[in-house]
Image (cartoon, rainbow, N blue to C red):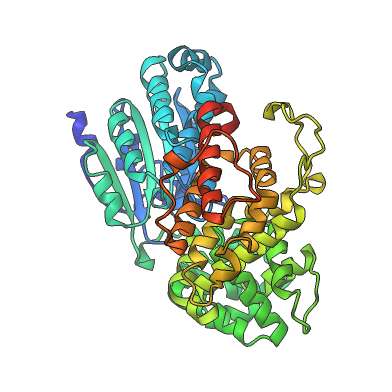
């Protein structure tokens, strides 16, 4: 038999590949011919599972991963789950780095081979602009030069890798002759185009039609119905819920008061949930709006302590509401938002990427102007940093201490923990909020006003905080580049020459600098730190 035919491009319905799972995932059908060709042939290649949102791609991959782990044939399995809403796991560098980390944990002996080929140099640069290049080289070394065979790499939600995805495609194509890749994504042209050059691939499409979705979802629905508080001790309601959710095949679990109106598609579902929040009392309605506006605008999922900073800031001047909220209040607010938000390990998430997509694309103007929310989050971040940041905030009393020598702190004892998000993303919110028509430019961008005062008093404290959070590079450099460009755009003053001719090797007297020159010199200083001391970049 011509083995190259085993990976010819085929499309099949998912009803042929899935069986019942354990309630948390879907398992693969052991008799599925095409899957077995990919699974058992010695040749490598790509198996691509694609489908619309909420159709079970992640559940299916979880089932396949469990099957591979339980029935290993001397294979070396690594996997990574992308999520567009979390900047830590939505880049190609994060994907490749995660796969490498998994390989090294399983085979520590590979580390010596990596060090032999790459030395210790990359350690401090894996968060820098060349991170993906370095990680790709390491990945190729492991899969090509170490003798490691039967490598299987699984990447879920490839479409949610929003940074350098095309370069990730190149790595997949380059290594598909010796690595078996299992990928999942939505039905998107970019995904199809990116994988077009793969010579050996099999495509499994999870059809949108509910009749073609495997009845294995029954087990999944039944398992989770048992965990819904509103349905406990009510067998009749459990049965009714099961029948409804099964007929809709949405994989979304709702509380009792929305079951009768559950729609046929996800967008109508999200619209229904928002309609219900608007029918709450004034306090509940505004709580939902505030929470959704913050979570939607945030650049990554927020820990509840971080979220609390923005919630308290929103209502501190509102006489109709409490002036200070706690974590229990935040959890209650999330419940008022229906099924659109969930809290896991004290971090708040949208229940699905499609939920955030819907809010951003269809509901933002209905609930809140997105640019205004960016402006408010910038204001809150600036105020929070001004109030919290101080020199030697950890009380180390040793400015020369190596970052790796600083003992980890419990979140309750870490003064930076609630404002971590503020420290990293305040400039991004400023840049977006600047486009809001109500942005008070003179209040923030004029010399000696709020932003300038913050930088003069707290700039070095901010740099210290980013270093302690291991976010100095590239976050600080990128932030200062954006800030410099924004201030330049606002000032429109051509009298200041290029930063190369103006910047000095020493930090200028901040008390005599204008805001624009301050941003130029600050950016140059952080660039110098990253270039001269790459270990500080970590």
User: Is there any visible trace of residue 443 in the rendered image?
Assistant: yes
Residue 79: image location, x then y, percent: 48, 37
Residue 56: image location, x then y, percent: 45, 56
Quadrant that contains the N terminus: top left
Residue 395: image location, x then y, percent: 82, 38
Q: Residue furthest left?
A: 2
Q: Is residue 178 left or right of residue 152?
A: left
Q: Compared with residue 77, is residue 221 higher up or lower down, i.e. above or below? A: below
Seen from the viewer's position, the closer of residues 37 and 203 is: 203
Q: Compared with residue 219, is residue 165 higher up or lower down, i.e. above or below? A: above
Q: Is residue 43 left or right of residue 347?
A: left
User: Is there any visible trace of residue 242 in the rendered image?
Assistant: no
Quadrant that contains the C terminus: top right
Seen from the viewer's position, the closer of residues 105 and 40 is: 105
Residue 314: image location, x then y, percent: 69, 72
Q: Residue at x 49, y 73 (%)?
A: 436
């Amino acid at each position: 038999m011509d083995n190259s035919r085993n990976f010819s491009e085929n499309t099949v319905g998912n009803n042929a590949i899935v069986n019942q799972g354990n309630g948390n995932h879907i398992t693969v059908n052991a008799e599925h011919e095409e899957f077995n060709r990919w699974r058992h042939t010695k040749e490598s290649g790509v198996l691509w599972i694609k489908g619309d949102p909420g159709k079970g791609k992640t559940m299916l991959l979880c089932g396949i991963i469990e099957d591979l782990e339980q029935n290993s044939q001397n294979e070396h399995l690594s996997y990574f789950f992308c999520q567009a809403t979390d900047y830590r796991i939505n880049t190609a560098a994060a994907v490749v780095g995660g796969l490498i980390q998994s390989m090294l944990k399983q085979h520590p002996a590979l580390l010596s081979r990596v060090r032999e080929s790459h030395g210790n140099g990359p350690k401090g640069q894996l968060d820098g602009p060349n991170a993906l290049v370095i990680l790709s080289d390491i990945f190729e070394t492991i899969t090509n030069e170490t003798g490691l065979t039967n490598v299987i790499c699984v990447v879920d939600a490839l479409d949610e890798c929003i940074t350098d995805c095309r370069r990730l495609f190149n790595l997949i194509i380059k290594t598909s002759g010796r690595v078996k890749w299992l990928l999942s994504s939505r039905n998107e042209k970019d995904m199809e185009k990116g994988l077009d050059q793969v010579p050996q691939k099999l495509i499994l499409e999870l059809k949108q039609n509910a009749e073609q979705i495997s009845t294995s979802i029954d087990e999944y629905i039944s398992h989770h119905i048992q965990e819904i508080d509103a349905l406990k001790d009510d067998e009749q309601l459990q049965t009714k819920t099961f029948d409804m959710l099964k007929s809709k095949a949405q994989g979304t679990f709702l509380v009792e008061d929305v079951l009768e109106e559950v729609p046929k598609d996800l967008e109508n579902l999200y619209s229904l949930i928002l309609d219900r929040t608007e029918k709450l009392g004034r306090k509940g309605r505004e709580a939902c709006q505030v929470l959704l506006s913050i979570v939607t605008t945030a650049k990554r999922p927020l820990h509840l302590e971080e979220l609390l900073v923005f919630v308290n800031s929103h209502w501190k001047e509102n006489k109709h509401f409490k002036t200070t909220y706690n974590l229990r209040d935040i959890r209650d607010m999330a419940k008022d938002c229906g099924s659109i938000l969930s809290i896991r390990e004290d971090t708040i998430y949208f229940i699905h990427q499609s939920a955030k997509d819907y809010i951003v694309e269809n509901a933002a103007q209905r609930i809140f102007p997105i640019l205004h929310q960016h402006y408010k989050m910038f204001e809150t971040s600036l105020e929070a940093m001004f109030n919290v940041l101080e020199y030697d905030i950890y009380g180390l009393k040793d400015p020369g201490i190596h970052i790796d020598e600083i003992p980890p702190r419990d979140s309750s004892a870490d003064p930076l923990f609630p404002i971590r998000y503020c420290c990293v993303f305040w400039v991004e919110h400023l840049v977006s909020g600047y486009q809001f028509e109500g942005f008070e430019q003179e209040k923030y961008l004029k010399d000696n006003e709020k932003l300038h005062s913050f930088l003069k008093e707290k700039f070095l404290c901010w740099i210290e905080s980013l270093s302690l959070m291991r976010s100095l590079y590239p976050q600080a450099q990128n932030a200062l580049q954006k800030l410099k460009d924004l201030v330049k755009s606002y000032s429109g003053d051509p009298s200041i020459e290029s930063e190369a001719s103006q910047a000095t090797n020493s930090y200028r007297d901040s008390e005599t600098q204008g805001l624009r020159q301050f941003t130029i010199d600050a950016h140059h200083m952080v660039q110098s730190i990253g270039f001269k001391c790459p270990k500080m970049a970590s």
